Amino acid sequence: MDSKRFSLEGKVALITGGSRGIGKASALAFAEAGADVVVSSRKQADLDLVADEIKAKNRKGLAIAAHVAKLEDQKKLVDQVVKKFGRIDILFNNAGTNPYPGTLLEAEEWAWDTTMNVNLKGQFFLAQRVAKVMKEKGGGKIINVSSIYGSRGSNEEEHPAVAYNPSKFAVEGLTKTLAAKLARYKIYVNCIAPGFFKTDMMAHLFKPEMKPILDLTVGAIPLKMYGEEDDVKGLAVFLASRASNYVTGGIFPVDGGLSAS
């Protein structure tokens, strides 16, 4: 096996939702594989800390605050990256939200709109904007981030989300659509679908009063454990590298076997 196929030397990666969780872990993984990395989210101070960690790995790191659901922010973000590096080879389309952890019958329009604007609209238009840059440079890799809930429902106790689940179903459909339409430009589009990870978005499950639900949830996972942020790193680097050059339109669960059970 030629390990150089997994190298990201000379590549420039843009990661949204890059200040914490899976986004941060993947940003650091790309840097470890040799890429220069731009991290973006809404809070500059948090991003600066991640950029410092990237630089500590002897790679160029840049932190740019932007709201992915605001198209004017997206334009400024991409323009700044291209001005600094001249290209974008990898987009890790990770920013997401679940602002309404309530019941289906009480959900309001704002919760639906906010969730869809970030999780779907934001991913689509950023992929479109970055794809234009990639096309001019001969191709690239786009990795969308969905969820285990992009292919299954959930009850109120397991995952109190209403718009979140449909938004992630849509991300998986978007991935396949982008993959088919962008293949002619050598732009590969795949999707990572994390399962139960110990991240801020799943923090409600790790409260003491939720232990019975957490135990049931973990018990349903064949590997009998929840994921840690580093568990996504290997797949992210594979999908960003030459090693995945015959892979596009794929949905890759990282869920301890839950989707197979």
Image (cartoon, helix red, strand yellow):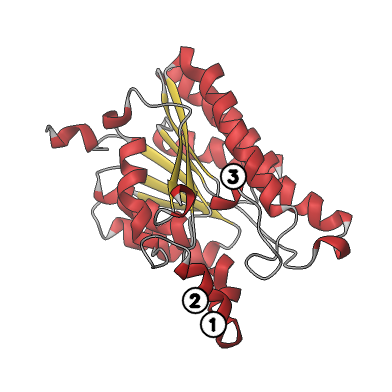
- Where residue 234 appears, x then y in whole percent? 30, 48
Q: Toward which corner of the image does residue 89 lie, by quadrant?
A: top left
| Residue type, label 2 | Asp
Whether residue 103 is visible? yes
Residue found at the very far left of the displayed protein = 1
Q: Are marks 3 and 1 in contact (CB under 8 Å)?
A: no
- Distance between the Cα atoms at labels 3 and 1? 25 Å
Name the N-terminal-most of marks 3 and 1: 3
Residue highlighted by disc 1: 211
Q: Secondary structure at mark 2?
A: helix
Residues at circles 2 and 1 in contact by the CB criterion of under 8 Å = yes
Q: Which residue, as the protein is rendered here, is positioned at the far front?
A: 261
**Residue corresponding to mark 3:** 151
Task: Kindly identify the amino acid type of the residue bearing the numbered disc 3.
Answer: Ser
Q: Residue at x 80, y 57 (%)?
A: 111
Can you give x and y, in whole percent of width and height, for residue 94 in the image? Answer: 53, 48
According to the picture, the residue beneath numbered tag 2 turns out to be 215
Which residue is nearer to you in this view: 5 or 57? 5
Q: Residue at x 33, y 52 (%)?
A: 233
Between disc 2 and disc 3, whose residue precedes?
Answer: 3
Q: Looking at the rendered structure, which numbered label has been put on residue 69?
A: none
Residue 198: in sight, yes or no? Answer: no
Residue 224 position within the rendered picture, expressed as x and y whole percent measured from the top left = 38, 67
Report the side of 120 relative to 107 (left or right): left
